Image: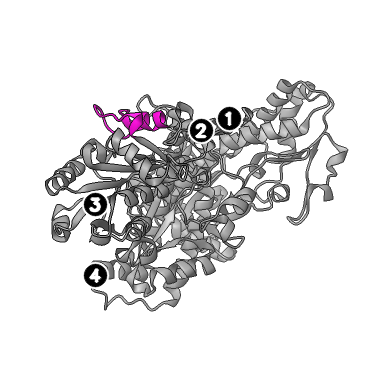
Amino acid sequence: KLAPDTYIVSRGPFLDAILSQRRHSIRKATLALTAAKDAESSPSDHVPPSKYDFVAGCEGARSPTRAWMNPDASVFSVGTFELMGLLSPVDSARLRSSLVPGHLHKYLASETGLAMGVVVLHSGDVLWYFQVNEDNHALPDGPNATCDLARTLAASFPGAPVAVAIATQIDPPTAYVWKATAVSNMETLHRDNVLLFGDAAHQFHPFSSQGVNGAIDDVVTFLDLVQELKQQPLDMDCLGRLYSRIRLDATKPLVAEGLVFSSKFKSQPSDAWMHKTPPVFESSSSDEEGSTGVLRMAPLAVLRQRAFNYRWATVPKGVIPLTAADPDFACSDAITQHLQAEVALQVCPYAPALGLAEFRHAIASHFSTKDGHMGEGSSISPDQVVATNSAASALAVVMNFLLTPSDAILIPDPVDFLIPLTARKTGASVVRFPVDRRGLDIDVLDAHYTRKIKFLALCNPHNPLGFVYSAAELQLLAQWASRRGITIISDEVWSDTVVNRRTAFHSMATFYPESTWTVYGLSKGFALAGCRVGAVVTPSKAAADALGEHAGFFSTVEGVSCLSQIAAVAALSEAGLAWNRAFAVHCRAATQLVVEALNRTGVFEAVSPSGTFLVWAKICPALRLTSDQVAQRLRDEALVSVVPGSEKFFGPGASGYIRISCATDMERLSEAMQRVSEWCKTQRQTVVWNVDVDENATEQLHFKQYCSLQ
């Protein structure tokens, strides 16, 4: 039993103290604490696992056991550090009476990312620390630099007596530096009979305040599993898999929360948000949104084998691909269960030409529900739905059916390349009209309209700009199109990825049902790109039948795998939609983190999207590099792959931008943004910024001021 006010600081006694309370539940298991001394070795070099029932890896943040279990794990800086020390005995005695023992006193600076904490220890000593943004203050390289920095930082808190004492004391303050780091590509907490505990298992950012709590939860969870399994001898493989899944599911959201807090800390003055208007991070379970599912990363080894289209399977090892809009997350468990049940039937006959009845019903229901796509009071019938081999195929089927070489179609610029590419393949003329984040501009449409134009393509939510058309805009567009007899082809593949809580998605067909052909897919919102399943929602049953006849559905030339349709049905079930809600919560925080990180660089400017999980970032004109050049250099030098804003991908209006997909976990995003930040620092140091020639005076001033601060 521990004495009151005793702090356990070493890992061995910490585990022993807890294990001793419940050693009867371990039965014959023996605990061995790894004591590896270098990161190149495995536990077997120091504690042969075969000698024990299980080995606990508890070496902390730089755990070699973790590296042995997770060879792709990467420890990276999060761009903040803490400077900490004790006041001199004289100053501690003088000031401790003005402080509450055992309580944290927090002081906030107006400088971006600078805060100070003070604690009176039970010994009577006064502990102080500074939380520091590494963009503003370089990591000190020695004792003298550390002391100088401590005094400099203390001067930023003139109203704090402890800070005044640090800044004015004659003897150099004793200070220590602790650099905050995180770990990406952490996939398992067990291998063979070895398990990870504490900081070796999860590296929480200090802002999450979960380090000791996490270690306690690890041990309690492990012991509970030992009791539940009641096996003798212990099945360590089964126990390890359960322990790993439970603890990773529990800790990853907390790790993500700390990383997002860190990004906020570095982006805004501390006194503008810390403890006053803190950001809210939650996997929402409100009645309005419904419960959420659990997100789990797909194994990196699988992604490297299977994730193509500019993603993991196509980039060199070490490069983080934030490219094609395809989530790195494993799909919902509901999808797996439905597919397993279908395969177990061992029957694979032809499906109905236009799709399985349950598939067509699921799509119709999804579009018709109040918090789905169509809006209250609107509905579609299952016989308006045609199952297609992906949203891209749906777009091609519709355009080949509707467009002729004598037609012209209005298409936004920029927009995903598939829309103009597919239109041109029909022989129709493509008329591009400019679009920006402000959304619909009827004057722009009028300026580009001619009598030859019979069609208009819409992308809602918009890829790559990330905005969502409002109901008022769509109503206005419906009126404009109706007066001119224009048919609208609405690409709504991103409709399940609205990330802004204040933004509601509305389908174009709600306002213009008689002349809207809706293209839909489940690759973005449900991580089903490889299933190649989508749908067309047509204006009527007759239109669906005519489309099916024209495209060859009734002659089996076209059609969708039954398994893919079953996966879609599962995705749109309540369990699948819970996964989608969890994904939206994640994307909300992920896009925010990326936007704030990019805006800190002085090289990129970005705005958080309302829909999609994409960040569209403007390149500083002073950099004097094209979008393709920036993307290439980020891949080669920062080891981060992004999509350039080139005409090839989005049209002429994309020049000067890059697109970043945020559909991966917070650890990978944070590591990628740290790499981008470091690359941007080298650009600011080596490039002669062209701040006097560019025509955009506002940007000139912004970047000139930023660079002068550096």
Disc on the earlier residue, 2 or 4: 2
Disc on the earlier residue, 3 or 2: 3
Residue 249: x and y in percent read 57, 35
Q: Mark on residue 696?
A: 4
Residue 128: x and y in percent read 51, 48
Magenta segment:
360-384
Spatial CA span between label 4 and label 3: 32 Å
Camera-side residue of 213 and 471: 471
Spatial CA span between label 1 and label 2: 8 Å
CB under 8 Å between discs 1 and 2:
yes
Relative side of 220 to 438, left or right: right
Above or below for 531 versus 685? above
Q: Amino acid at mark 3?
A: Leu
* Pointer 1 local density, CA inside 10 Å: few below 14, some 14–19, many at least 20: some
Residue 683: x and y in percent read 44, 72
Residue at the spot of label 1: 342
Label 2: state its secondary structure: helix
Q: Mark on residue 566?
A: 2
Relative side of 51 to 710, left or right: right
Above or below for 256 versus 174? above
Q: Nearer the viewer, mark 2 or mark 4?
A: 2
Above or below for 686 versus 133? below
Disc on the earlier residue, 1 or 4: 1
Give the residue furthest to the right: 51
Relative side of 419 to 675, left or right: left
Residue at the spot of label 3: 456
* Pointer 2 local density, CA inside 10 Å: few below 14, some 14–19, many at least 20: many
Spatial CA span between label 3 and label 1: 40 Å
Q: Amino acid at mark 1?
A: Glu
Residue 629: x and y in percent read 43, 72
